[in-house]
Amino acid sequence: MNDNYVNFKKQRELGAILTDTFKFIRLECKPLGGMILKYAGPALLIVIFAYIYYMQTTLGNLGLLNTAMDFGAYTAGIFIALLLLMVSGLAFYALLYGTIIHYVKIYIANNGVVDKKEVSQGIKKDFWRLFGLTFLVGIMAGIGLVLCIIPGIYLGTVLASTYAILVIERRGISDSISYSFDLIRGEWWITFATYLVIFLLFYLITFVFNIPQYIYFFVQTFVRSQEISADPTAMFDWIYFALNGIALLAQYLLHSLIVIATILVYYNLNEKKHLTGTMETIDNLGKQQ
């Protein structure tokens, strides 16, 4: 077997999913990373600026809450910031998932060779469907978490495969969501364990990028304690927001780890249900003979 190729269409245990996630990133980091920055990068920049604007609006303008008029302007600013953050976030995730899943789909079809034009065409074709799917998945998982944490975790685990189903199998949004429940039937616990480990690794890595802002925050609190006690907004200066923005940028880009893992999980579940990869391998062996 070629050590420079990751075979997605096969069954994997938890350890193999983690290993192949990092292996694929190592092998395809440069071309895939370039495409992520090209297509999802602009939306990510808007997300970062929207987040900084939101933080500046909520934390930097607390001193304006002196009159009813100031409170109205403050509330309007928060609403605009949240709206911009939500829309840009949905667009980013739609583009991120679209880029990576189309990349992997073409990677598999061409045995490791990826045509960037095909990826671009696929992203444009599926953007709005992925945008709508991201919105619906967020609403469903969010409601589950609000009503009770367990239903939210259950739905989040089930719906993680919907993106791959929509792009790879060319199903509609509602059909992708419905099929994800069928695909994971009998495999929920091992799938949940897989995602749990992946998310723990993800947050451990992203924590490293948050350390500078935590250090700056505590140093500010210690050095400027009197000034901050008089005006708490003084600790939220441009340096804090810049460090926060860098950490957020790393967090969103590192979400690619989770996307690749969800694709591997999808193929793992699909192989267990339908043995698609196994049948293709047998057919190829028959043709070679």
Image (cartoon, rainbow, N blue to C red):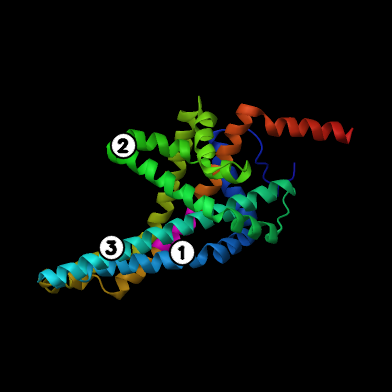
Residue 244 visible (yes or no): no
Q: CA distance from mark 2 to mark 3?
A: 26 Å
Residue identifier under label 1: 44
Tell me the number on the disc at residue 66.
none
Seen in the picture, residue 12 relative to 172 is either above or below; the reply is above
Residue identifier under label 2: 149
Instruction: Classify mark 1: residues with Cα within 10 Å, few (<14), some (14-19) or many (20+).
Output: many
Question: What is the x, y in percent for residue 113?
Answer: 73, 54
In the shown orientation, is residue 49 left or right of residue 62? right
Question: What is the x, y in percent for residue 201?
Answer: 44, 47
The reply to whether discs 1 and 2 touch (Cβ–Cβ < 8 Å) is: no
Tell me the number on the disc at residue 79.
3
Q: Which residues are magenta?
A: 248-255
Q: Secondary structure at mark 3?
A: helix
Quadrant location, the C terminus:
top right
Q: Secondary structure at mark 1?
A: helix
